[in-house]
Image (tube, helix red, strand yellow):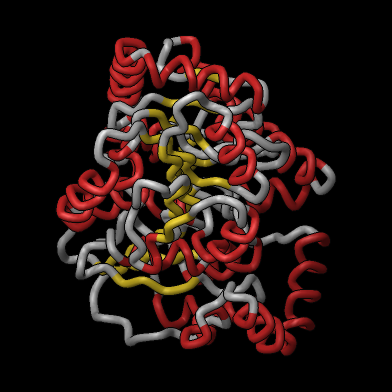
């Protein structure tokens, strides 16, 4: 981005002028639980620890899904480049907390700096990466400019450009070309993203969806055994990664069944625990974050903890994917439960994973419902028909296993950019 268009120059000047306000902004976000008060300096580009000597490879994923999708890539880096330092950055506290239990011990985690020229310059001056790998849709102009100026090679892996994002970039075509053109390598997540990247003026060097190549979510076997003992012979419906409004919808759908199963709610943001309990005030709820056990009269088990979605999936007779039942959620990755052979139900609002859900439905690996009434009807049918559940679960597992394949080809391309 040596010749920055006027729009990006104005963006940089505005961000620089606002930089003195970032401490106030961060303190405000910290009060709302959105920043780690002890690590806010990292968001301003001040490193939280010294840089070890040696070549450094930096990977960035904004939130939980992107961060977890980086894990197989980080593991490969540690295996094939043990001499290299691996730096992983995220933008959210939740992603940092989840990633903490999945990173190799030698890897370093930092929060990504805000996209001001000053913060980006401080970050790059300290860490000096030889290669920066951005995951999905993290296109921060000032951060990319600082990385380019520092001499780092840039890759955009598992690149996802939504229709909405593409429309936004189309209003500033010069900026779009400059930003997307900063990358030395672009591996698109799917054909639709590939077309949008080309329309922005970029090039596509191959396909890679890191979420296709993730390993099954881990589980604490002792915790799983304990919960299974508490559940007994009750059927279990898991509502995974739920958003506001979906918890009540799920509770009502389950309560309408003739023999109400245990409903396990694993919210997308566990910090919403109190809010969810309030929405379900007329229902007997046990909270995992407080160590409460599942009793015979427990209607809802609120799995309001981080990093335990693998535990919830393994408990499920049927898994309902959150973010899909109400408008605006966008859906969440169905391959996570599919890798565990789960019986999967989804709503229609899955814009972020439209192609995956459509393919799974066509393959008989998931069931899509239109609303609460159909959700109750499908749950009632599946909970009494173990053969159908087994067939759906086997199809989901086969679908997930068949999605592997692009990683090795992509890895060879990434290797050409790695520092020596």
Residue occupying the point 52% across, 86% down: 37
Residue 11 sits above or below residue 390 on the image: below
Residue occupying the point 45% across, 27% down: 259
Query: Residue 149, percent across and down?
Result: 54, 69
Query: Which of the 4 image quarters holds residue 11?
Result: bottom right
User: Left or right of 175: which side holds 183?
Assistant: left
Residue 11 sits above or below residue 355 on the image: below
Query: Residue 192, percent across and down?
Result: 60, 26
Q: Quadrant of the C terminus?
A: bottom left
Q: Residue furthest front?
A: 297
Residue occupying the point 36% across, 11% down: 388
Q: Quadrant of the N terminus?
A: bottom right
Residue occupying the point 61% across, 57% down: 281
User: Left or right of 302: which side holds 385?
Assistant: left
Query: Residue 126, percent across and down?
Result: 42, 82
Query: Residue 237, percent across and down?
Result: 42, 35
* Front in this rendered view, residue 230 or 179: 230
User: Left or right of 377: which side holds 29?
Assistant: right
Query: Which of the 4 image quarters holds residue 169?
Result: top right
Residue 323 sits above or below residue 82 on the image: above
Q: Is residue 385 visible?
A: yes
* Front in this rendered view, residue 100 or 178: 100
* Front in this rendered view, residue 273 or 328: 273
Q: How many marks?
A: 0
* Front in this rendered view, residue 189 or 353: 353
Q: Is residue 184 visible?
A: no
């Amino acid at each position: 981005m040596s010749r920055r268009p006027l729009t990006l120059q104005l963006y940089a000047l505005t961000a620089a002028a606002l930089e003195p306000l970032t401490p106030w902004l961060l303190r405000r976000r910290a009060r709302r639980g959105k920043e780690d008060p002890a690590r806010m300096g990292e968001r301003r580009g001040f490193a939280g620890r010294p840089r070890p000597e040696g070549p450094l490879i930096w990977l960035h994923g904004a939130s939980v899904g992107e961060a977890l999708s980086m894990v197989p890539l980080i593991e490969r880096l540690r295996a094939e480049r043990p001499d290299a330092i691996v730096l992983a950055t995220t933008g959210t506290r939740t992603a940092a907390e989840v990633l903490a239990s999945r990173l190799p011990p030698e890897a370093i985690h930092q929060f990504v700096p805000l996209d001001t020229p000053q913060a980006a310059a401080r970050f790059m001056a300290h860490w000096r990466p030889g290669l920066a790998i951005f995951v999905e849709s993290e296109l921060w102009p000032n951060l990319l400019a600082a990385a380019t100026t520092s001499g780092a090679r840039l890759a955009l892996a598992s690149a996802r450009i939504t229709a909405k994002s593409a429309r936004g970039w189309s209003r500033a075509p010069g900026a779009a070309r400059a930003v997307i053109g900063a990358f030395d390598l672009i591996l698109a997540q799917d054909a639709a993203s590939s077309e949008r990247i080309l329309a922005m003026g970029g090039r596509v060097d191959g396909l890679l969806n890191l979420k296709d190549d993730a390993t099954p979510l881990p589980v604490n076997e002792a915790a799983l055994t304990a919960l299974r003992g508490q559940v007994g012979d009750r059927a279990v419906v898991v509502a995974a990664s739920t958003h506001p409004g979906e918890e009540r919808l799920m509770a009502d759908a389950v309560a309408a069944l003739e023999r109400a199963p245990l409903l396990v709610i694993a919210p997308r943001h566990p910090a919403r625990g109190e809010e969810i309990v309030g929405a379900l005030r007329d229902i007997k709820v046990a909270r995992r974050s407080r160590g409460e056990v599942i009793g015979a009269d427990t209607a809802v088990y609120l799995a309001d903890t981080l990093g335990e979605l693998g535990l919830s999936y393994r408990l499920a007779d049927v898994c309902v994917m959150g973010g899909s039942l109400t408008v605006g959620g966008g859906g969440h990755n169905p391959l996570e439960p599919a890798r565990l052979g789960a019986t999967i139900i989804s709503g229609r609002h899955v814009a972020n994973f439209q192609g995956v859900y459509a393919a799974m439905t066509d393959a008989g690996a998931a069931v899509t419902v239109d609303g609460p009434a159909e959700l109750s009807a499908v749950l009632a049918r599946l909970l009494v028909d173990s053969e159908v559940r087994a067939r759906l679960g086997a199809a989901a597992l086969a679908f997930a296993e068949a999605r592997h394949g692009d990683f090795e080809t992509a890895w060879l391309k990434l290797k050409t950019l790695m520092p020596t």
